[in-house]
Image (cartoon, helix red, strand yellow):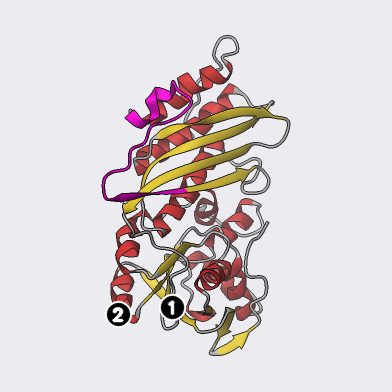
Amino acid sequence: MPSAPEDPPGDEGEFGWIERLLRPLTRGAPEALNLLDDAALISPRPGFDLVVTKDTMVAGVHFLPDDPLDTVARKLLAVNLSDLAAKGAGPLGYFLSAAWPRTATWADKALFAEGLRQAGDAWSLPLLGGDTVSTPGPLTLSATLMGEVPAGRMVRRSTARPGDILMVSGTIGDGWLGLQAARGQVSDPDGYLAGRYRTPTPRLDLIDAVSTLASASADVSDGLLADAGRIAIASGCGVVIDLDAVPLSPAAASWLAGQPDEMAGRRTLASGGDDYEILCAATAEAVPALAAAGLTAVGRVVAGQGVEARFDGQSVDAGSLGWTH
């Protein structure tokens, strides 16, 4: 874990936090105006649309209160980058809002800023502005990310059509299992599962594939079944998910092997959330190229409405589709 700067002499307050810890995170982006103003100045490139997304994370709700703050910072940016990737948009920068409990120390803020720095370096993402306040409540963080996509090319949830194939990247269920592992409720000897929960990797590597091949797209944040349902609602269609086709990591497959009911276990993994993979609908012609990019066919878009889960060729109770507030 990186060492944090010692508390500065005296109370530097908000301006010290901005000057010493946040200004370096702008990565020299001119749009940030060196964090000396109350706004940023952004000019979209000719021929591109701006794509804007925002997510909030609250201690005890979206992350465990004792999670290391550098991992919390990385996750805050990762979940927003995941939204941009699902739209086929390349990231430009972010705005940060942080409501710190009055008990937070300079070392806490420095460790959080270190996580932002690591994420900014990994994903070439500059801080463009934001706000910071104190609160008597839990640590509350919010990031607004901006991305760009060629004009008219953003991939929406609402453009799936009956006959499209549903495909998902990576593996599903690791995020939910990772939360259980972080709580000590699931065996995780190598820390893989807890890592998938605390520091997900946004699928920026799939931006080109999504933007050129997907009919519709969303990221898997609240659960595969729930997010498939959101594509269905937005598109005015139904979706069918084959639970036995959902890709699993070796760790998730090992957990599943220990469950008394395989169907119920697979349903749990498909509704757990926090995977931050890409779920997209695509025409049959686009499936081979998406498969070559690492996506797996898990279902299809049909006429009608709602989500149907299937296991071993039979329709089953979808149960709770996923996380909701």
Quadrant, the C terminus: bottom right
In the displayed structure image, the side of residue 152 where residue 17 appears, left or right: right
Name the amino acid type tagged 1. Arg
**CA neighbours of label 2 inside 10 A, class few (<14), some (14 to 19), many (20+):** few
Instruction: Please name the residue shown 28% across and 43% down the image.
Output: 45
Instruction: Please name the residue shown 37% across and 39% down the image.
Output: 125
Question: What residue is shown with label 2?
Answer: 285
Residue nearest the observer in this picture, 210 or 109: 210
Instruction: Please name the residue shown 54% across and 14% down the image.
Output: 8
Residue 199 visible in the snapshot: no
The magenta stretch is: 29-52
**CA neighbours of label 1 inside 10 A, class few (<14), some (14 to 19), many (20+):** many
Q: Is residue 111 above or below residue 56?
A: above
Q: Is residue 274 above or below residue 31?
A: below
Name the amino acid type tagged 2. Glu
Residue nearest the observer in this picture, 292 or 6: 292
Residue nearest the observer in this picture, 256 or 324: 324
Residue 125 visible in the snapshot: yes
In the displayed structure image, the side of residue 11 where residue 34 appears, left or right: left
Q: Quadrant of residue 296?
A: bottom left
**Distance of mark 2 from mark 1, alpha carbons?**
14 Å
Residue closest to the far left: 46
Q: Position of residue 231 (x, y in %)?
A: 51, 69
How many marks are shown on the rendered structure? 2
Labels 2 and 1: the sequence-earlier one: 1
Residue closest to the far right: 136
Q: Position of residue 194 (x, y in %)?
A: 55, 52
Q: Position of residue 244 (x, y in %)?
A: 51, 80
Query: Magenta includes 225?
Result: no
Q: Which label sits on residue 161? A: 1
In the displayed structure image, the side of residue 241 where residue 105 appears, left or right: right
Q: Position of residue 42 (x, y in %)?
A: 36, 36
